[in-house]
């Protein structure tokens, strides 16, 4: 395969996220939450590998006809924001006005965040919560905390979108790189586990999902608070 075709293949891989989003939405409309989340986890994996592949195969120079960044943002909004927000509302986890309030906050704040040119930091992390509502809502489904707690988490995370609080990119943030990847893989494993058992998961799976979620949410802020040691001369 020529380098140009390799670059095109990466774009085509990214585009499969749109199909995965549709499959997840069809499952969500039927309230098949486990199936919906399995499709979203597959989409998350595709999103995790297409970026490194795009950089490796130089898609911006070898196949510039398609804007890979724009393609990725469109799919991410569907799989990270729109479908999880729909699921949170339709499932009834947030009753009454709280469900309406949450989906308005999630969709409105997230679309502004996706359009913010300052969302990436110099170390390839994110400034503000990167709208990973798919991960948040899946944890809600698995743990089912009190709805006031869920509403508080939604408001707190949405609020951080408009701050300089740092959130790691699981693949691209260099600091604590391998720990970040390990925690991300752990989260994916626990997510698949709880979805496969229709969210009636053993305590160890729920605990693992909570701990990895907390790490991924707070690791970037911890990096801001803990100065990085200078490399020895």
Image (cartoon, helix red, strand yellow):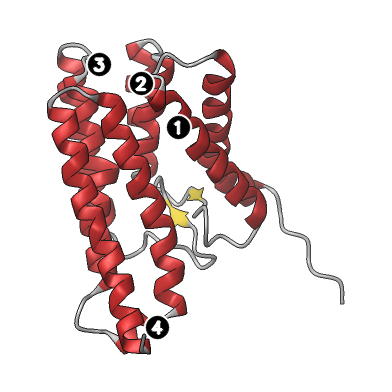
Eye-nearest disc, 1 or 2: 1
Q: Measured from the top left, where is residue 125 in percent x and y?
A: 49, 58
Tag 2 near tag 3, CB within 8 Å: no
Eye-nearest disc, 1 or 3: 1
Eye-nearest disc, 4 or 3: 4
Pick whichever of labels 1 and 2 is earlier in the sequence.
2
Callout 3: SS: loop
| Tag 4 residue | 58
| Tag 2 residue | 141
Tag 1 near tag 4, CB within 8 Å: no
Q: 10 Å neighbourhood of mark 2: few (<14), some, or many (≥20)?
A: many
At x 47%, y 63%, the residue is: 121
What is the distance, in whole Å, between disc 1 and disc 2 at their CAs? 10 Å
What is the distance, in whole Å, between disc 2 and disc 3 at their CAs? 11 Å
Tag 2 near tag 4, CB within 8 Å: no
Pick whichever of labels 4 and 3 is earlier in the sequence.
4
| Tag 1 residue | 191
Question: Going by the image, does 76 lie left or right of 138?
Answer: left
């Amino acid at each position: 395969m020529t380098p140009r075709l390799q670059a095109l293949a990466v774009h085509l891989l990214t585009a499969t996220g749109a199909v995965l989003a549709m499959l997840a939405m069809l499952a969500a409309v039927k309230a098949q939450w486990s199936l919906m989340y399995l499709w979203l986890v597959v989409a998350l994996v595709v999103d995790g590998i297409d970026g490194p592949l795009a950089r490796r195969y130089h898609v911006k120079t070898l196949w510039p006809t398609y804007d890979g960044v724009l393609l990725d943002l469109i799919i991410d909004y569907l799989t990270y924001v729109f479908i999880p927000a729909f699921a949170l509302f339709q499932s009834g986890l947030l009753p009454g006005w709280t469900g309406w309030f949450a989906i308005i906050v999630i969709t409105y704040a997230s679309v502004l965040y996706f359009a913010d040119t300052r969302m990436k930091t110099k170390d390839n992390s994110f400034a503000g919560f990167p709208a990973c509502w798919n991960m948040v809502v899946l944890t809600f489904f698995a743990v089912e905390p009190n709805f006031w707690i869920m509403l508080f988490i939604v408001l707190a995370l949405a609020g951080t979108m408009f701050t300089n609080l740092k959130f790691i990119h699981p693949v691209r943030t260099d600091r604590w790189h391998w720990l970040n990847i390990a925690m991300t893989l752990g989260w994916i494993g626990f997510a698949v586990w709880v979805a496969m058992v229709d969210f009636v998961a053993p305590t160890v799976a729920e605990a693992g999902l909570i701990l990895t979620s907390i790490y991924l949410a707070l690791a970037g802020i911890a990096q801001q608070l803990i100065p990085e040691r200078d490399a020895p001369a």
